[in-house]
Structure formats: structure tokens, C-alpha cells
Image (cartoon, rainbow, N blue to C red):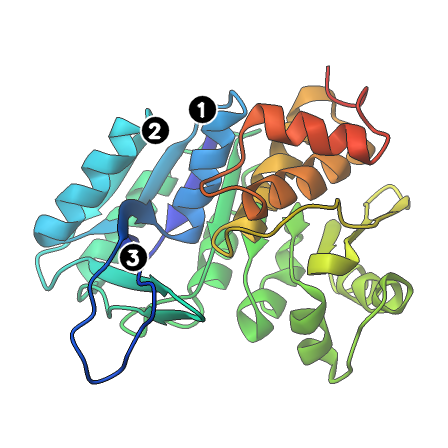
Amino acid sequence: MIYTVTFNPSLDYIVTVEHLKLGAVNRTNNEIMNPGGKGINVSLVLRNLGYDSTALGFQAGFTGREIARLVEERKIHSEFIEVESGLSRINVKIKSEEESEINGMGPGIGDADIKKLYQQLDGLQDGDILVLAGSIPSVMPETMYRDIMEYLSAKNLRIVVDATKDLLRNVLKFHPFLIKPNNHELGEIYGVELRTREEVIPYARKLQEEGARNVLISMAGEGAVLLAENGDVYQSEAPKGEVKNSVGAGDSMVAGFIAGYLAAESYEQAFYMGVCTGSASAFSEGMAQEDKIRSLLGQLGKGDIWP
């Protein structure tokens, strides 16, 4: 079974304003309401690829109930924990000449709520996949990812971590199955600027030396690099296309990697599925769909990699 955790889910209210004017009344010409959060995005794309998952996390108030409803409407099973204090956040994304975002705070998650999450995690079985993605709300311990991985260390799980800086580095000693920083985040960890795929490789290898099993580095228009636990190194340029959507491309890459690996336990297939799934979301108004992914695989000469 695949489980995704989103500590601070959101309602993403995406509006288009032809010419945004600060200090004036603006009217939208398009509006979309989606469930948001990195773990939820992974679940959404996995569903598009034919893989079921269970979305875990916290919800509060009427906004939390709407997040859960929208997730279930998209045929994703959720087991969000109801928090009594506050409201699940609304993130407003304004598309105009430039894109702007206003992100809400989220509910007051307490120790009793966190205890309920651990009780859910007790149900994970050997062989399950757990995806921990995104930032930690300020009301929760900064060590949350590390604490979860330590708590589950006796189980034979494949844990995927998509996080940054210390949040990522602190989990490496527990040997996550996959980590996915981008080149800028990788550079921040080691205090360097990384622009090319070749420059990324030695620093991705450092993350392996610190404990990560597989290191996937996303590089936007420069493509991606994978250092697999079997010693193989894969590089790819980015597929060509018009970027329409800046939300969820990295999460889609994670979902594509998981789907590709589960289909054949091939790191090559997992890598190219990740690259093309991430790009498919970037080139679409919504999340990646199968036909777009297949088209991009063909563009990279990997059309036969996904049966």
C-alpha cells in the first residue's frame, strides 16, 4: 500500500485576473478550487497512473471538510485527522502578468493530534511505501520527519522524503528509499551553486554517503539526475513543451518515479517516468495524465519504457 502524508493540506483557490492592480477592485475571469499540499498532489498523480494510495494528514473546520470531500471526489481514499483548533488553510494563487500567492496558516495541531498520526502509522506493513512531502507547520516539532522515520525504523518500509535543508538532512541516517531535492536545494545544503547535471552528481553522491538510497535531483529546464542505490547514474534533458502550470511538478515527478518503480522495479523506468510525469504536469493546466506522459516519453526516445 502507498501512503502519503500532508501535514498542512490546503484549499488551493486559483484565480486568473487579466490585469492585477494593487489597491483596486479586481475581478476574476477564471476560478478553480483544488485540494492542495504536496502529499495530496502525489496521491492525485498516482491515481492518474492507476495506483491507489491513502492520503494522511490533518484537517480542521469547514475548509478541512471540503479538502477531504474534494480528495474523495477524485477517488482517493483519505484518513485525515480532525483537529479541533483553527481551520485548514486556503491558499490563494493569482495568475496575472505575474503569479502571486497568499498562503494561509493552517490549524493548531496539538500533541494529541500527532499521537493519532502515530497510531495510524502503526498500521503500516512491511513493503508499504510512505511519502513524506512538504514543510512542517510551525505548530509541530521541526524534527517531525526524523521522528517518524525513527519510530518506523524497525519496519521494512520504502520511505520517500521530499523536503529541504535540515528537514531532509536529518532523515538521511534512517536510509530513505528516495529523496528529491532540486539543484538549488542541493546547493543550499552544501553551500555551492549547481547549474549543470554534471555539477550535481558529486553532491548527490554525498547525500548517498550520508544514507539516502536513491537521490533524484530535479533541475527544471536542465532536466534531472538520478543516483540509484545499485550504483547506476541516469541523466536526462528536460522534455520540450510550454510551461502552463507551476504547481505540483515536483510532486508529480515523485509520483511518476514511484509508479515507474512499482511497474518493473527498474530504476531506469522509474527515472524516466519521473522526468516525464513532472513535465506533463508542468505542461498541463492540471496534474499529469497518462496520454501526456506517454507523449513525452516518446519525445525522449523512451516510448517503450512504460508498457
Q: Nearer the viewer, mark 3 or mark 1?
A: 3
Q: Answer with mark 2 or mark 3, whichever residue precedes in sequence.
A: 3
Query: Between residues 138 and 172, which one lies in front from this camera angle?
Result: 138
Query: Between residues 155 and 33, which one lies in front from this camera angle?
Result: 33
- Residue that numbered label 2 is attached to: 76
Q: Which mark is residue 15?
A: 3
Residue type, numbered disc 3:
Val
- Residue that numbered label 1 is attached to: 52
Residue 231 percent across, percent down from the top left = 90, 46
Q: Is residue 175 above or below residue 76?
A: below
- Please identify the quarter of the rendering in which residue 267 is found: top right
Classify 10 Å Cα crowding around label 2: few (below 14), some (14-19), many (20 and above).
many
What is the secondary structure assignment of the residue under circle 2?
loop
The residues bearing labels 3 and 1 have C-alpha atoms spaced at a distance of: 30 Å
Residue type, numbered disc 2:
Ile
Residue type, numbered disc 1:
Asp
Q: Residue furthest top?
A: 307
- Which residue does the image show at 34% across and 70% down from the upper left? 19
What is the secondary structure assignment of the residue under circle 3?
strand
Q: What is the number of callouts on the image? A: 3
The residues bearing labels 2 and 3 have C-alpha atoms spaced at a distance of: 25 Å
Q: Answer with mark 2 or mark 1, whichever residue precedes in sequence.
A: 1
Check if mark 2's residue and mark 1's residue have beta carbons within 8 Å: yes
Query: Between residues 253 and 226, which one lies in front from this camera angle?
Result: 253
